[in-house]
Image (cartoon, grey):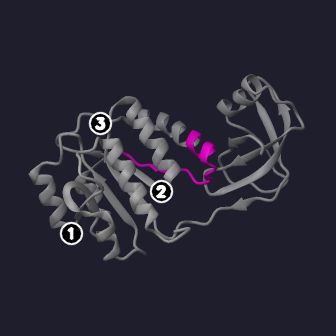
Amino acid sequence: MPDRFYAPGKWQTGDELDLPEGESQHISRVLRMKPGQSVELFNGLGNHALAELVEVGKRRVSVRICGGVVSQDVPEVHVTLAVASPKGDRFRWMLEKLTELGVDRLIPLRTERGVVDPRDSKLEKLEQNVIAACKQCRRDRLMEIAPVQSLAEVLAQSPRGCLFGDAIGEPLSQVLASSDAASPMVIVVGPEGGLTDAERDLLQAAGAFPVCVGRHVLRIETAAVALAAAALSMLPAGR
């Protein structure tokens, strides 16, 4: 199986294009590949294709799309997680796992007890972790990282009452079994200090359902991954 690289944009069979600098350096300096070798490209928009290396320089690598462009189906049900940001490497780990699971969109959530409020520049850097996870798990569509939003902003754009993690909530499987599985899904995960009474009232006033996936209090990233895995496992194949 050929090595896999990210090539953003729309392309088709026969196109010749330059790879991003980071991907080019990995090909030339780390893998030491040569012109004529085959690679697989994905564009983050749901497509992948075989390509041949045309030119390999230290900073610039050009390729030619030589295989048919394959398109991944667009999920019928979009899954969004709005999560209070965990610290440091825990955030990066969470991004990777949510990407592998198939979450469509991540919203860093600003809460009253949250201690991390990532800047836009940090979120842009974290997109590289999403790209790396897509390369590893062979996902063709990037998970979107939205700007930081408040709970009120998340609820204002939710198409239906969302779900929120709560140690005393109903089992997630039970809630999903009685809901419209064809609707977009938004899952909220609060900070380690928990949601405030005011935030819980805001959620419940918006028709949100408290759900749990275990008997114990979970860390942010554990709760996010557990809820996402449980929800995605109950959706139709291919979503």
Q: In the image, which is nearer the foreground, mark 2 or mark 3?
A: 2
Left or right placement of residue 6 versus residue 187 in this view: right
Mark 3 lies on residue: 117
Q: Marks 1 and 3: in contact by CB < 8 Å? A: no
Residue 54 or 27: which is nearer the viewer?
Answer: 27
Which element is circle 3 on? loop
Q: Is residue 68 visible?
A: yes
x, y percent for residue 110: 26, 44
Q: Is residue 145 magenta?
A: yes
Earlier sequence position, callout 2 versus callout 1: 2
> Which amino acid, by three-letter code, is at mark 2?
Asp
Q: Which residues are magenta?
A: 132-147
Q: Is residue 107 visible?
A: no
The label shown at residue 207 is: 1
Mark 2 lies on residue: 104
Which element is circle 2 on? loop
Q: Is residue 163 magenta?
A: no
| Residue 237 location, quadrant | bottom right
Which element is circle 1 on? loop
- For label 3, the crowd category at 10 Å Cα-Cα, with few meaning under 14, some 14 to 19 and many 20 or more, is some
x, y percent for residue 48: 71, 54
